[in-house]
Amino acid sequence: MSFINPLRRIGSDNARKAAIITTTAVLPRSLRVARRKARLGALEVDIARRSSLIIIAHPKSGNTWLKVMLTRLYSKRHGIPEADFARYPALADANPEIPRFAATNGWYSYERAVGDKLQPGAPDSELRHKPVVLLARNPLDIAVSWYFQFTKRQSSHKQELINAELSHPVDRTNIGMWEFVRESEIGLPSLIRFLNHWDAALDSLDHTLLTSYEALRREPAQVLRQITELMGDRFSDKEINEAVEFASFDNLRKLESEGFFRSGGLTLRNAGDPESFKVRRAKVGGYRDYFSEAQAQELEQLVRRELSPRLQALFGLDQPQEDTPAAPAAAGQ
């Protein structure tokens, strides 16, 4: 049975979010930011409360990719028509057999509302007893993808909320890659703090899994199985492999470029700009393509100095590194 007609009757979290943004649009900036942060934060907590899994990940760490694979598993199991998968984030709104997956960074703007409830010392809450996955990624690779996300894909309301917390707001129309990554308040140092923050927080929660974007790229079936088992569910090798194949880089890139997805993070923004795609490169270690050798070494030293030992081991940064010449910096960077 198609989910579209029931969905129109019951509404969706996306519709609730849109209503909050629309009804506050006419307010003065300071009041608009405060209202949106509070109301979207309450919605974010409510989504997490109703979810079967909380995925903690910084933007550009693979959380959308993971959500697609997980939703694909359950949609195939429960016979959701292929055309309906175009609105994959809304499947759980209409079909109670499909779990909801709350993907949040728990760090910026209204998403911090979830993060605060998961921190050591926070009052006991339903969220603290849910399965929680920290999907980490090498902050050097996040930094480059985050630059493109913030300057080319970020919604204006989310950008405004993030900038409202900064002493020096980021002007996405006039900031270059190096300035963003090395000098802005949401650049590499902030990414390292984010990862360390959540690495430490996991130890105070009941049901957690620390994994990485790199592991998901290397062994997607194994990581997907670990996550479903954390949720108390099991899938066959055939089911796991079908979800992995559907969510492969080439297939998602093709579907995004064709405008297949009608909601969620994979909706097409600018078909003429490959760097604006959600499925952009999926390259491990690709940050070196955007910096000079000296710049890359400075960034790498910062990560080795500041990132937690457990995360350095997760990314293989605790091992001796061979010198790898960087590609020339991209034009204009």
Image (cartoon, helix red, strand yellow):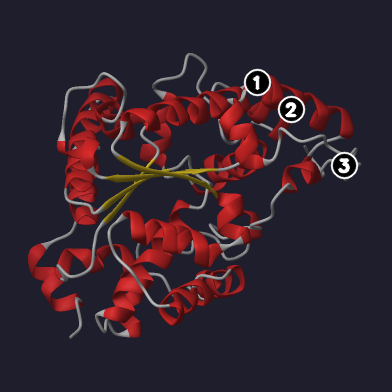
Compared with residue 23, is residue 249 higher up or lower down, i.e. above or below?
A: below
Secondary structure under the numbered disc 2 in the rendered image = helix
Residue identifier under label 1: 183
Compared with residue 22, is residue 122 higher up or lower down, i.e. above or below?
A: above
Provide residue 64's location: percent of width, then percent of height.
44, 56
Provide residue 148's location: percent of width, then percent of height.
60, 45
Density class for disc 3 (Cα within 10 Å; few <14, some 14-19, many ≥20) is some
Q: Is label 3 or label 1 in front?
A: 3
| Residue 163 in view (yes/no) | yes
Rendered image quadrant of residue 316: top right
Q: Is label 1 or label 2 in front?
A: 2
Provide residue 42's location: percent of width, then percent of height.
18, 36
What label sits on residue 326 in the rendered view?
3
> Given the image, on which type of amino acid does mark 1 rest?
Glu
> Given the image, on which type of amino acid does mark 2 rest?
Leu
Rendered image quadrant of residue 216: bottom right
Residue identifier under label 2: 299
Provide residue 209's location: percent of width, then percent of height.
42, 45
Q: CA distance from mark 3 to mark 1?
A: 21 Å
Secondary structure under the numbered disc 3 in the rendered image = loop
Mark 1 or mark 2: whose residue is earlier in sequence: 1
Left or right: residue 261 versus residue 322 is: left
Q: Badges 3 and 2: C-beta atoms under 8 Å apart?
A: no
Position of the C terminus by quadrant? top right
What label sits on residue 265 in the rendered view?
none
Q: At x 63% / y 60%, what residue is drawn?
A: 218
Mark 3 or mark 2: whose residue is earlier in sequence: 2
Left or right: residue 156 versus residue 307 is: left
